Image (cartoon, rainbow, N blue to C red):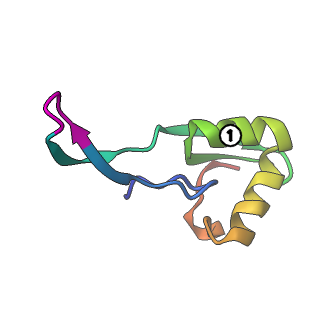
Amino acid sequence: MSKVCQITGKKAQVGNNVSHSKRRTKRKFEVNLHTKKFYWVEEDMWIELRVSARALRTINKIGLNAAIKKAEAEGNLDIKDIRILSF
């Protein structure tokens, strides 16, 4: 599974390591991802999502259902990609 946030769509970025002598080598900036369990009240089930720290704040602010609908509209999430834990 790739390191992409299912809510915000954030993924790794590429940049440079810069040494003291200003020599540059390529590096990757990974996303701060967490696998979290959520209770989806509207569907009455537990689900598991791979979300970034920023996505956790978004879910706390607008709610899980609204965040899922927004991610689906932006093309970051497909309902088939949601891992259902129990009904």
Q: Main secondary structure of the magenta part?
A: loop
- The percent position of residue 42, horizontal first and vertical second, equals 86, 52
Residue 37: quadrant of the picture: top right
Q: Is residue 72 above or below residue 87?
A: below
Residue tagged by mark 1? Answer: 38
| The N terminus - image quarter | bottom left
- The percent position of residue 73, horizontal first and vertical second, equals 74, 71
**Quick one: 61 or 69, which is closer to the camera?**
61
- The percent position of residue 67, horizontal first and vertical second, equals 76, 52
Task: Identify the magenta region.
Answer: 17-22
Whether residue 73 sits left or right of residue 14 in the image: it is: right
Could you tell me which residue is drawn at 56 percent across and 45 percent down?
A: 51
Residue lying at the far top in this picture: please name it: 20
Q: Is residue 41 above or below residue 56?
A: below
Residue 77: quadrant of the picture: bottom right
**Quick one: 54 or 47, which is closer to the camera?**
54
> SS class of the residue under badge 1?
strand
Residue lying at the far front in this picture: please name it: 21
